[in-house]
Image: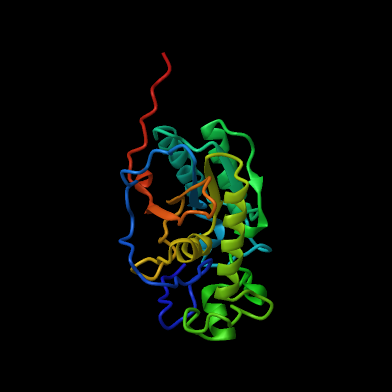
Amino acid sequence: MSHTSTSAHAPSAGQAPPTGPSRLTGSAAPSAEATTEHGEIRLLVVRHGESRASAAGVMSGVRTCAGLTDLGREQAHRLAESLTREEDPPDAIVASPVPRARETAGLLATGLGLDLPLFDGGVREMDFGAADGLTVRQYAVRYGAFDLQGQPDRPFAPGGESWNQLCARVRETLERIAAHPPGRRVLVVCHAGVVVAASAVLTDSAPPEVFSDDSPAPTSVTEFARGTGADAPAPWRLLRYDDHRHLAETAPESVPAP
């Protein structure tokens, strides 16, 4: 998929533009607060691994997704290995039902030794409507370029969602998960548009650069935390954004059988 600026154009395949003040600095390590505290809920919002649609430059939504590439599966394995080394690994998984996210979540559950994921349509990718299954070039010819952030109520294509609709759905879903969490540190396996929308609606933050097919990176982790137990919910805190250091780690060499 090509990199497309949302300052003047619709996003590239599988993407949606950021909104809100820009105050992030790209990939970040966990902060000093990274250990889960008593009475705190953590949401680790993870983008799926590389998909076949992404590799082919196709805008694939709910109806046309064909799952992960071999590279996407390897990325999921690497993330699982990385998460098992964290001081407080995730203890539950919620995932989008779209095949690329379902497959990523299943691999993570196996690698982390967790129960099968709970699937929630509220964290599926933006509904592309009539554009679902089109290439980026086909979309541009058929519907033209427009600024999703500047026109947040315009549907991506006929029958599809707008940016504001996506943000409202993501907010409602993540707040619902946080209100009745299946664990203390929950992996939410979803899509690039959902990651950016979550940053916008939970912490009023957005990436400093327009995100593309590689940002947030496949299997990257964006982590939010909020204290619980008070009369009014505490504000969400952003602990890390687009953390994909596991993708740069050298894969362990296989040991020959004796």
- Work out whether residue 11 or residue 149 is closer to the camera in this orientation and state it: 149
Can residue 95 be seen in the rendering of this structure? no
Question: Picture coordinates of residue 110 (x, y %)?
Answer: 57, 34
Can residue 24 be seen in the rendering of this structure? yes
Q: Is residue 182 above or below residue 244?
A: above
Q: Is residue 86 above or below residue 122?
A: above
Q: Is residue 250 above or below residue 165?
A: above
The residue shown at (58%, 33%) is: 114
Q: Is residue 222 above or below residue 151?
A: above
Q: How is the image coloured?
A: rainbow
Q: Residue furthest top?
A: 258
Question: Picture coordinates of residue 81 (x, y %)?
Answer: 43, 35
Question: Is 155 left or right of 33, judged from the image as shown?
Answer: right
The residue shown at (53%, 45%) is: 229
The residue shown at (36%, 32%) is: 252
- Work out whether residue 59 or residue 82 is closer to the camera in this orientation and state it: 82
**Screen quadrant of the C terminus:** top left
State the image quarter where residue 205 is shown: bottom left
Question: Picture coordinates of residue 30 (x, y %)?
Answer: 34, 46
Total marks shown come to: 0
Q: Residue furthest front?
A: 231
State the image quarter where residue 4 is shown: bottom left
- Work out whether residue 141 or residue 16 is closer to the camera in this orientation and state it: 16
Question: Picture coordinates of residue 88 (x, y %)?
Answer: 43, 34
The residue shown at (49%, 52%) is: 45
